[in-house]
Image (cartoon, helix red, strand yellow):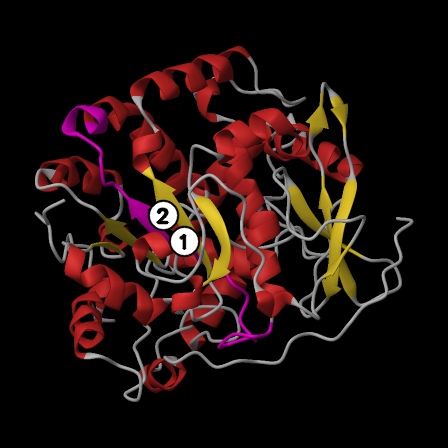
Amino acid sequence: MTTDYEGSAPAGRVLSSGSTASQQAGMFPHGHLGHLSAHQEEALERFKVVLQEKGLWRPGPPASHDDQTLLRYLRARRWVVDDALGQFKDTEEWRAANNIDTLYRTIELEAYEQSRRLYPQWTGRRDRRGIPLYVFEIRTLDSKTIANYEKQGANSTFSQAKTDGKTPPGLLRLFALYENLTRFNQPFCTQLTDRDHADVPVTMSTNIVDISGVGLKQFWNLKGHMQAASQLATAHYPETLDRIFIIGAPIFFSTVWGWVKRWFDPITVSKIFVLAPHEVKPTLEAFIDPKNIPKKYGGELDYSFGQLGIPDPAWEGVIRWEKGHNSFPSGPLLWEDVPGEERLACVRLGAENGKTQREVICTLPKTWGLTEKSSDESTATESSATTSTNTAATTINDVSEGTQTSEDTLDDSTQTDGAAEAIEKLKIDEKAETKTTEVTPMTAATAAA
């Protein structure tokens, strides 16, 4: 790289209003790196041994898959090593068969942007715990749009990737977005130290799903597409969800919910909350600072669905923008070590008219180790089922299987009666998270639109 990588110090740590309560609860970040029980530590070590014996993991350095990635599979399978092995193996074979790394690195920027504008979008902000916040407006997915999207995708992957022919080709572009979230967004949020539990890599996402204005017919027409996409994400990007808040539910949504909840593990279902109109503002404010909540949902952020993420003032003094950039662009982004410095560079890849691109967007101080594979290494690895899922880290915005045990409540000094009531409804009993019986998460299953 020819860019000057002169840097600055990381931001200071800022406590969220829920920090005291969450620490007293002793739950978050239970089951995450650095906060494992003896049983969980043992499971992780046994998992590594089995994966290495099967040729699915290399210890490195650098390791082919970092610990926080392996832990996602263990949490998803309730720490049963053999079950986690099966899911991990299936994912590695799927990634290799569909050249997922090549797809991400060589996707046409126009095709990437088309996908980005249809699906959950990062607002550029985080919740009170430093977890990235996404918004998804379902009404943009009408039957005509989806039919056109799938038809175009069936004719081309819009990249140099080859596919196995088994995964619906119309959906493959969607997984470039998942890769962006695991290889760019989650590692980025991990590097930022202005959050509770800054010693724990960020491996989750918080989501606002707006279903206002969506009729029963549109839900029905989307059923097949959303089911296929959700099940693939659940299978291959496990344990990446912390909360989904559903807003604007019409009175018939209880019928729709009957279909949707069958696609997911009961514990995943327990992370989805349908909010009545009077619950939206206090609930969101309990988890997200008002300055980071879009105005449409009662906050202060001037954000509209479709636009790129709005840079956070908290990044000032942390991010050094390059080549005239002042925000993150659309396209496949990933982080690479800056040679000779304790900094990371954000690089945009992708292609325009078949010609691959490479552009440094910014750099920031390195607070977590990270080594991104070169494209040659990725191509070589991808030719076998032992391809690395990713070396960057951690999560993706999807509804996945798991036993996440996070909880956040408001400090007594900031808690309103409305927020208190909302949080009581959102509490997940830690014992209930280990059950296999179905959990009904809806706080207002038949809320009026």
Residue beneath the point at 78% across and 41% down? 359
Which of the 4 quarters of the picture holds residue 371? bottom right
Classify residue 88 as left or right of residue 383: left
Q: Is residue 146 above or below residue 100?
A: above
Q: Counting residues from the N terminus, which is met first, the one under dot 2 or under dot 1?
A: 1
**Residue 46 placed where, x, y %?**
51, 61
Q: Is residue 20 visible?
A: yes
Identity, as a three-letter code, of the amino acid under mark 2: Ser
Classify residue 38 as left or right of residue 173: left
Tell me the tag on residue 239: 1
Identity, as a three-letter code, of the amino acid under mark 1: Glu
- Residue 218 belongs to magenta span: yes
**Residue 210 placed where, x, y %?**
29, 44
Q: Is residue 343 above or below residue 16?
A: above
Element class at badge 1: loop
Task: Name the magenta segment's main secondary structure.
Answer: loop
Classify residue 295 as left or right of residue 281: right
Image marks 2 and 1: residues in contact by CB distance under 8 Å: yes
**Residue 52 placed where, x, y %?**
61, 51
How many C-alpha atoms fall within 10 Å of the one at disc 1: few (<14), some, or many (≥20)? many
Classify residue 186 as left or right of residue 27: right
Q: Is residue 92 visible?
A: no
Residue beneath the point at 74% across and 33% down? 380
Give the residues drawn in magenta, as a range: 193-219
How many C-alpha atoms fall within 10 Å of the one at disc 2: few (<14), some, or many (≥20)? many
Element class at badge 2: loop
- Residue 321 belongs to magenta span: no
